[in-house]
Image (cartoon, helix red, strand yellow):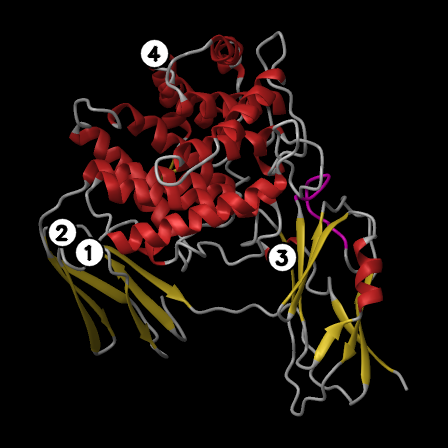
Amino acid sequence: MCTHSESVLLSGDIMGRALKNLDGLLRMPYGCAEQNMAVLAPNIYILQYLEDTKQLTPDIEAKGTNFLTSGYQRQLNYKNNDGAFSTFGSGGSGNTWLTAFTMRSFVKAQNFIFIDPKVINDAMIWLTNSQKGSGNFKLMGKFFNNHIKGGVSDEVIITAYITAAFLEMNPTVTETVTKSLSCLKKTIDNVANTYATALQAYVFTLAGDMETSNKLLSHLDSVAIKEGFTHWAQTATNRYLSVSVEMTSYVLLALLSPYSLPAAPPSPEALGYASGIVRWLTRQQKYYGGFSSTQDTVVALQALALYSTLVFNPEGSSTVIVKFSDEEIDFEVDQDNKLVYQEQLVMDQTGKYTVEVEGNACVSVQVIASQLKHILTIRTLSKNLRLYVCLQTKRLRYTGKRETTNMVIVDIKMLSGFVPDEKSLKELKGEAQVERIEHEDDHVVVYIKELSKDIPIQYDLELRQELPVSDLKPAVVKIYDYYQQSKPDTFSALDIIYRDHYSL
């Protein structure tokens, strides 16, 4: 059922929506190294897909490589002298997961822009030196998303991730990779973590160990959620969307990676199974082409790009008719406009939508409802006001099931004519758990390292009126778990309040 205003979105290519928004697949702040890579990495897979299917035009290549170059330059700000990368730069502790993520992305980006080989080599050496005698890699720095934990040690997951990075760089199995594969193989019979199983299936596929990979894929098929489409979750009651998207994408990569090299094409059965996964993934895609968060967007687009390359057909056309009430919208898709992202806004239509397709070209159709969630607003203010944004002691606390949250973002939109007081902003930067503050345009974004269960905190930010503005409109404050934006009810609706204070 659809209500209020919706957008009917259509593309003749699964990658069309992401292609339209190369510079903004995720609408969130980009103040740390991981967020910067979430802009850089998807561009690589999109450009590679277009090049492989001979659809890469000079204009798209110029736009994409420009984003890659600027992202690469920004990422160097987070590089330490020892070759590692840290979340917020400035000589912070090296992070093994982030360093591997950056290294594997830079290797792929070399196909399109200049990457200093020393940057890649230094990262590889630092990661190699973090390997233990057992073959595991040390987890240094906070893991990117604590939803992936459960039933398996962090070192198993980080070892699988780094091993995949090394194998994507070089399919030749080195001594370092041999040790890590041996270590991982000892854990596969006792893995109770679906995320780890999916990631390891991809790792052993990359390593050419199809016996082990097929064993893991067989287990994954037995625990798959097949509700019309196929996907995976940690448990039946633990379906955090960003983690489900990521692990489902790893399964798709494990299934299709054997066909990414010149080899026999996938069988109809394999493509049929994969299409059920792809249909679920594309249903989770957001309006701008990204997914719930950073890492799931990167892995999902890597998997979707691989699938799109394997099923690409340079011929065909289709007519799509979307019907609602007594009206209909017609779309035409052919080889000249298949990469064009077509959108039609439908206002105030209530009821069921039906879609009819005639032709032989693949099309992706999605209906997205327009939504904007206000956590809290101020409706009346007086002139010459000093306003205090107070994150109250008894209000701002995490009450969920985990011991700690992931990184928490507080996005404070300024009221028209107001700016943050510089002294107050500086004091906020020094508060416990505050990793970083960004003040850009009319927003102040606060990065909180984590919130512990049932332990309240208090932060204050003073705003001062710089310009008098008549008919002042409310502003919005949003708070969310960085890796689970689709679950705003993780926090109470009264988490953040505005308090107005008058001053002479």
Query: What's the mark number on residue 338?
Result: 1
Label 2 and label 4: CA atoms lie apart by 36 Å
> Alpha-carbon distance for marks 4 and 1?
39 Å
Label 1: which secondary element = loop
First-in-chain label (2 vs 1): 1
Q: Earlier in the sequence, mark 1 or mark 3?
A: 1
Can you tell which quarter of the image residue 289 is in?
A: bottom left
- Please report the bounds of the magenta region as a residue range: 397-406
Residue bearing the label numbered 4? 211
Q: Which residue is mark 2?
A: 361
Give the alpha-carbon distance from disc 4 to disc 3, as whole Å. 43 Å
Dot in front, 2 or 1: 1
Image coords of residue 55 (percent x, y): 21, 48
Tell me residue 350's x, y (percent).
35, 75
Q: Which residue is mark 3?
A: 489
Residue 354 located left or right of residue 32: left
What separation in Å lies between label 1 and label 3 (alpha carbons)? 38 Å
